[in-house]
Image: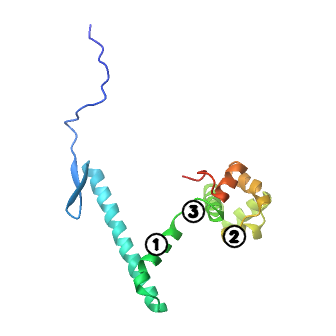
Amino acid sequence: MNPVTEPVAWEVALEQQYVPLLHEGNMVGFCTPTYAKEIAEALNEEDRVRKALRMACLDLLRRVGGDTSRVGELMERYIERAQRPKFGPRAIAAMLSDRQRDLQLSNQEFVKFCDTYKVSPRELKSIYAGENIDRRLIAPIARILGIAPADVLDILEGTASANDG
């Protein structure tokens, strides 16, 4: 009879191959060749996009006669605005856009859909504009999104991590 082997926490995988990942000639880690290539491509693409943003911001500052030494500040403002909002009315607007996409509705169909839940076209437009959301709309918005009204309130007030994903 074979003895039962107990699982061990540490093992050696001699068949696994790893390659170094380098940044400007300095080794920053090891990973499998496939992941190393994907990581390097993604990070190099990020560098290209950041350089393009810097060039665009410099062009903009030159055209409007702004201070070109503040290009970093302008870049950060644009980067911040491009990130998906986690809290506030803009976060709710992003969630409504996601819901429209999930339901595969046109803009007109989604406006009618929201109107049936007592969010008028005018109110929907103000939500998408990032304006403050009337508290009486919390329950209808929750029904549209399929989440609890408390979660909508948390997202609006930024008091919880209800929209981390």
Q: Is residue 149 left or right of residue 44?
A: right
Residue at image position (22%, 33%) is: 12
Q: Which residue is mark 1?
A: 76
1 or 2: tag closer to the N-terminus: 1
Specify the quadrant of the image occupied by residue 122: bottom right
Q: Which quadrant of the rendered structure holds the N terminus? A: top left
Q: Position of residue 48 (x, y in %)?
A: 34, 71
Q: Nearer the viewer, residue 63 or 77?
A: 77
Label 1: how many Cα within 10 Å (few below 14, some 14–19, many 20+)? few
Secondary structure state at the residue bearing disc 1:
helix
Q: Which residue is mark 3?
A: 85
Q: Quadrant of residue 14?
A: top left
Q: Secondary structure at mark 2?
A: loop
Of mark 3 and mark 2, the one earlier in the sequence is 3
Whole-angstrom CA distance, mark 1 to mark 3, is 15 Å
Tell me the number on the disc at residue 131: 2
> Can you tell which of label 1 and label 2 is closer to the viewer?
1
62 or 120, which is in the foreground?
Answer: 62
Q: Amino acid at mark 1?
A: Glu
Residue in view at x 61 percent, y 60 percent = 87
Residue positioned 70% across, 62% down in the render: 110
At 27% from the left edge and 31% from the top edge, which residue is drawn? 10
Say above or below: 71 vs 138: below
Tell me which label, 1 or 3, sits earlier in the chain: 1
Q: Nearer the viewer, mark 1 or mark 3?
A: 1
Whether 134 is drawn above or below 6: the answer is below
Going by the numbered disc 2, the residue's amino acid type is: Glu
Task: Locate residue 79 relative to residue 151 in the image: left or right.
Answer: left
Asked whether the beta carbons under mark 3 and mark 2 sit within 8 Å of each other, the answer is no
Please rate how many residues cluster around mark 2, counting C-alpha atoms within 10 Å: few if below 14, some from 14 to 19, many from 20.
some
